[in-house]
Image (cartoon, rainbow, N blue to C red):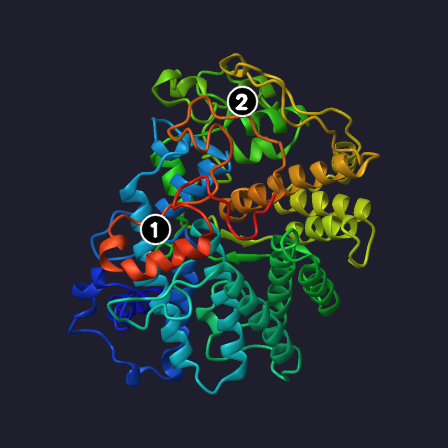
Amino acid sequence: MKKNIIRLFAVAMLFQITACTSDFNEINSDPNSLTSDQLDGTLAGPTFANALYKGTGNASWSLPGDDYGTYGLATSLHSTVFAHYMTPGWAAQTDANGINDGWRSRGWLRFYTIAVPSLLNTYKATEGNAEATAITDIWKVYMFHRFTDHWGPVPYTDAGKGGSTVAYDSQESMYADFFNLLEAANTTLSSSSKSTVAVFGDYDEIYGGDVEKWRKFANSLRLRLALRVSDVDASTAKTHAEAAVAAGIMESNDDSAYFHVTSDTYNNFVDIAKYWGFYMTASMESILKGYNDPRMREWFAPMSSAAEPPVGEAYPIEDYVGLPNGGGASLDRTGGNLSLTNQETTFSDAATKDIEVMMTSESYFNRAEGVLKGWNMSGTAKTLYEDGIKMSMNQWGITDSAAIDTYIAGTTSGAVPVRGSDYSDSTPPVDVPVSWAGTEAEQLKQIAVQKYLGLFPESWEAWADLRRTDADILYPLITTEDPTIGFGVMKRITYLPNSYSTNEEGVTQGISQLGGADKGDTNLWWDVN
């Protein structure tokens, strides 16, 4: 019943706030839209439910008549392949650092015509409710930090306010506001006498309105963003990181944030990976096999041509084969010889596999890196690193403590993948073991590798972290569609071509703030190394 209500409201509510450019005029003239004076506390739950689902980037339905993958393209064919988590079974431009305007446009337009209006509606419906507004602020930061870290400067302050020209905000100004919002949210929620926010209640498919869990989420997000700016503003980063940890962050997997799916609000990643044919990458194969990582069998399936193992035994690791990224039409993509996602258990059902929003293991890895930066993270780098591994293993149902301890003590490094000969140099990029190393440079790389694994399949953050750390843990692309980027990691998604005609002043402002050309090789503000 609840989800039917959400779907009914979705059509009515998504478009009543004027969107960013004149592209949206037809949408904004919807005569069935709710007006702002009709939004009150009774609609706080439905509006927030929409903002949560549409803001994850893995939403399934977005507009009546949309194909199930429309909004999910922002994830599956951008950050998922940029981070080398998976690669599609066809020659996709984005898999080789190229741009597909249709995929890029869908992600941008649906963020500003679906996710942002739902968020703004929630603000209107929760006016006067301090706790509800604080949680909405937290979700605003989550939505926008992911989006700006894809593009660079984007409409933020004036997003949803309408007009023929909409200003773009610099990343520096947005991040300053992010920190302010998260700090204020922690203050509000920590001083509240409420344990739950009743107006959200069951509509909150992440924490059920739990004040304390949202507070920990906010502080964990603040720690994430502190690391993000650590190379460009070390003093601010240290202040916010230490304050976040002192205020209380995620510590157990019970604190992890998942969007709990249903048949109406399902996990689009599962469907796209299953029906569009996405394979494990050679980079993932190299790391997982090299470490004999038990998560490989949870995430991926053996190639379908593999012989069935004896009853009671698992498929050998040799039966798991990844495909190099950027292969284009030059590589054999015969599905029977490659590993898809695990569609028997973990990723079998889009209506039951919850969407990963933010996992507790990340906070441990972030704290471990913080210690190496000289920050007070309430623990040693080694212990926090190892605890992060344990959290990630437990998250995926691997609970044998002896097996986990053996993994943590492992001394092997990356393996040459089955398709290693496709590379001019098949030497594995991951040349560090799991067992805590003796030099800081090695330790930073170990944290980067384990965090990369711990984030899977949440590729938005994985892609951002790869750019921030410049960690050399991935094989290069086989081919590239953009020689200026080359065979390394894509730096950003470029702006929509029609933005130059519909919001030329805004885009020009954004490029000026970007500090470089509107190209995929231009570093974002925080990516200074």
Out of 187 and 253, give the one closest to the viewer: 187
* Residue at 79%, 33% in the rendered image: 435
**Where is residue 425 shown, x and y percent of the image?**
57, 15
Task: Between residue 160 and residue 521, name the one nearer to us.
Answer: 521
First-in-chain label (2 vs 1): 1
Residue 417, image x and y in percent? 57, 19
Dot 2 alpha-carbon crowd within 10 angstroms: few under 14, some 14 to 19, many 20 or more:
many
x, y percent for residue 139: 49, 66
Indicate the quadrant containing the C terminus: top left, top right, bottom left or bottom right: top right
| 435 left or right of 313 in image | right
In this rendering, does residue 1 appear at all? Answer: no
Look at mark 2 in the image and give the residue it sits on. 320
Element type where label 2 sits in the image: loop
Q: Dot 1 lies on which element?
A: helix
Q: Between 284 and 342, which is closer to the camera in this rendering?
A: 284
Between the C-alphas of marks 2 and 1, the distance is: 32 Å
Q: Say if 146 sits above or below 44 in the image.
A: above
Residues packed near mark 1 inside 10 Å, few (<14), some (14 to 19) or many (20 plus):
some
Nearest the viewer among 495 and 458 is 495
For the N terminus, the quadrant is bottom left
176 is higher (above) or lower (below) than 350: below
Q: Position of residue 107 (x, y in %)?
A: 34, 51
Residue matched to label 1: 107
In this view, 33 is above or below 263: below
The residue depicted at 71 percent of the width and 58 percent of the height is 251
Residue at the image position 35 percent from the left and 64 percent from the top = 3
Label 2 close to label 1 by CB (< 8 Å): no
Q: Amino acid at mark 2?
A: Tyr
Numbered badge on residue 260: none
**Which residue ends up furthest to the top in the rendered image?**
421
Disc 1 marks a residue whose amino acid type is Gly
Can residue 291 be seen by looking at this rendering? yes
